[in-house]
Amino acid sequence: MTATEHTKELYSAMGISPEVYDYGNVIAGQLRERFQQIDDIAEYNQLKVLHAMQKNQVSEACLLGTTGYGYNDLGRDTLEAVYADIFHTEDALVRPQITCGTHALALALMSNLRPGDELFSPVGKPYDTLEEVIGIRPSRGSLAEYGVTYRQTDLLEDGSFDYEGIRKSVNEKTRLVTIQRSKGYQTRPTLSVERIGELIRFIKEIKPDVICMVDNCYGEFVEEREPGDVGADLVVGSLIKNPGGGLAPIGGYIAGKKECVENAAFRLTSPGLGKEVGASLGILKDFYQGLFLAPVVTAGALKGAVFAANLYEKLGYAVVPNGSESRHDIIQAVTFGQPEGVIAFCRGIQAAAPVDSHVTPEPWDMPGYDAKVIMAAGAFVSGSSIELSADGPIKPPYAVYFQGGLTWQHARFGILKSLQSLVDAGLVERNALNA
Ligand SMILES: *Cc1c(COP(=O)(O)O)cnc(C)c1O
């Protein structure tokens, strides 16, 4: 038997029917050129990361950690210099004490805004968990409680920027502009780095001293450029997404202008202490190694997203991005129009996991979200969404958001498993797979 025949046999043993397997093969066969482009970007980003590590003389000593106050933590300080080089920013804060992406964003906002300032989003509603940070949904300790107001301008119907609306919204109080690169739990398009650059240019023309922050979650290493290359003053993300490469077990980063990063450091630790304290404990080797792998891991996840888009698009589901458009993050939205589709999809993803594949996910009331959410995540790092994962809020339009896969091979298996789950639930007709 050939390797392919062995693989098909094992797929079958792992619950993938011949129809689903063959259907996936046809789709994958059509994507060779796309995958080559993804590999080309990964090659560039791999070199970018390596270059930054070499330039900053990452040494064996950097992989060790400190305890207690963590003064003179060579590995931590060097890693922050490496991040600053990769993101082409003046400085960076990369810490295990930043507990997640929301925390990183909240930290960047709360440290750079003062009472009386206004926060402005020119790209519509921000990510769900930020609603409580900002105080759009009232919450203890929100920016609103501290006298920071908020304003937003929605994207136009076709996804373009409402330049007129933006011009009207920027006022004497506007201090910080937050731009979310990724779509999050919405079906709007993700912003390319180029479009982020256009937006920042426009805003800086109106008000040059405003701080432009980009929520870079899920966008790292998808393109050759990052928001820091197009004028962002702050670039913020989570280490249990792309830049952690699947190995970082916790953490977030804030890269940007020296003053903005310093503000964040003063808030994370204490005024006066800033970046000087914060022991790295034993975590640095995983931060470095994960960052080193991140370009290739991101490429695998991206291939999975493109595969999912094409597979579900051909079956007639609305997918964002669509099968052929260019990618600016690793998230794939598939709209099922009914809760059963979201649930079956997520159960398929769960069944494909290396950890907890035997459990059945159920919709639940997650802190920070305003509707029940079902999550599929059988990850080595709890909640890591650079690993194969999917989540869907149980509310119209009943879209599921799929992302990750530490390898393309695993992403592929997971997507086939999701399709199998839909077929088994009677939501996709077997003969639809013959097309
Ligand atoms: C994931 C994400 C966040 C929040 O990150 P958590 O680690 O889940 O707190 C914020 N913004 C966007 C766009 C995200 O994708």
Image (tube, grey):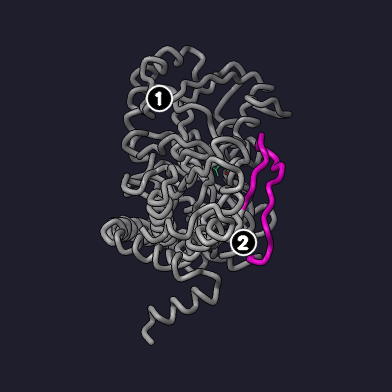
**Residue drawn at point x = 40 percent, y = 34 percent:** 232
**Residue 120 drawn above or below residue 373:** above
Specify the label residue 424 is tagged with: none
**Residue 425 drawn above or below residue 187:** below
**Residue drawn at point x = 64 percent, y = 60 percent:** 281
Q: Say which quarter of the image contains residue 107.
A: top right
Circle 1 SS class:
loop
The percent position of residue 91, horizontal first and vertical second, equals: 45, 43
Specify the label residue 157 is tagged with: 1
Q: Is residue 396 left or right of residue 164?
A: right
Relative depth, front residue between 37 and 65: 37
Circle 2 SS class:
loop
Question: Which residue is situated farthest in the right direction here?
Answer: 140
Relative depth, front residue between 62 and 309: 309
How far, Cα to Cα, is label 2 from label 1?
A: 36 Å
Relative depth, front residue between 247 and 74: 247
Query: Looking at the image, is mark 2 or mark 1 earlier in the sequence?
Result: 1
Q: Give the residue type that dot 1 points to.
A: Glu
Q: Is residue 366 magenta?
A: yes
The percent position of residue 46, horizontal first and vertical second, equals: 35, 60
The span shown in magenta is 357-375
Indicate which quadrant contains ligand 1.
Answer: top right
Specify the label residue 378 is tagged with: 2
Question: Within 10 Å of the Cα at label 1, are there few (<14), some (14-19), or many (20+) other Cα atoms?
Answer: few
User: For the image shown, how many numbered marks are present on the structure?
Assistant: 2
**Residue drawn at point x = 64 percent, y = 57 percent:** 382
Q: Is residue 165 magenta?
A: no
Q: Nearer the viewer, mark 2 or mark 1?
A: 1
The quadrant of the image that shows the N terminus is: bottom left
